[in-house]
Image (tube, rainbow, N blue to C red):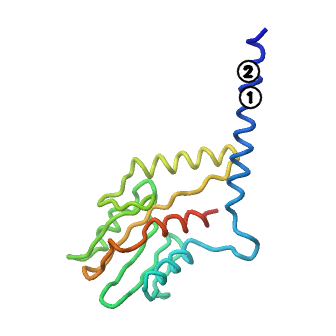
Amino acid sequence: MIQSHVPKIVFGGLLILTISLKISAGAHQPARGQVETASTQIAKFLTGQGFETDRGLVAEYPVTMSGRSGDCKLTIFRAAPEGWHQYVIRRLASDGDQAFFLFRGRKYQDQPIWLTGISSFWTSTIRKLGVKAPVEPVFGIVASPACNLDSMRWQELTEDVTAVQP
């Protein structure tokens, strides 16, 4: 008799869990009229760090934005989670330039393809189930030698771009 209630309890628990996930994912949506893109968030990040953004080098896909602050020139690229862009980003760095990848607010010398790929797969799977899951961005950063990148708030960039993902 008790065994007949177990599937119902499990189903009910899963139903409550999925509904609460959908509600919490919907809470992060911007209000009407406040739609922002990844490129606007990157531009805000750069200007907040004291950079002038170069509007001539802005591309929406893959998102690319450059900024300059004194002798420091910085370019932020949106990289594919599967690692497709990692070699291109490395080749764009001149001798002496700093090049690294940013994922979940942490810097990596090489793109952590296992982490970024699993995150992308998980997000895709959850979205197929109807849950709005945030896309965790992967960035390739190329900066001139004059840049002090340790003082920049990389976690803020990651969080702000994640918040505006469709």
Residue 80 percent across, percent down from the top left: 46, 60
The count of marks equals: 2
The amino acid on which the numbered mark 1 sits, given as a three-letter code, is Phe
The amino acid on which the numbered mark 2 sits, given as a three-letter code, is Pro
Mark 2 lies on residue: 7
- Does 85 sit above or below residue 143? above
Q: Which label sits on residue 50? A: none
Mark 1 to mark 2: distance in Å?
6 Å
Q: Residue at x 39, y 51 (%)?
A: 113
- Left or right? Give the position of 101 relative to 118: left
Q: Secondary structure at mark 2?
A: helix
- Does 107 sit above or below residue 120? below
Question: Where does the C terminus fall, quadrant-wise?
Answer: bottom right
Mark 1 lies on residue: 11
Residue 55 percent across, percent down from the top left: 50, 87
Quadrant of the rendered structure where residue 91 is? bottom left
Residues tagged 1 and 2 counted as in contact (Cβ below 8 A): yes
Q: How busy is the neighbourhood of tag 1: few (under 14 within 10 Å), some, or many (20 plus)?
A: few
Residue 8 percent across, percent down from the top left: 77, 23
Quadrant of the rendered structure where residue 15 is? top right
Q: How busy is the neighbourhood of tag 2: few (under 14 within 10 Å), some, or many (20 plus)?
A: few
Q: Secondary structure at mark 1?
A: helix
Q: Residue at x 68, y 54 (%)?
A: 25
The residue positioned farthest toward the front in the image shown = 151
The residue positioned farthest toward the top in the image shown = 1
Q: Residue at x 46, y 78 (%)?
A: 65
Q: Residue at x 71, y 26 (%)?
A: 10
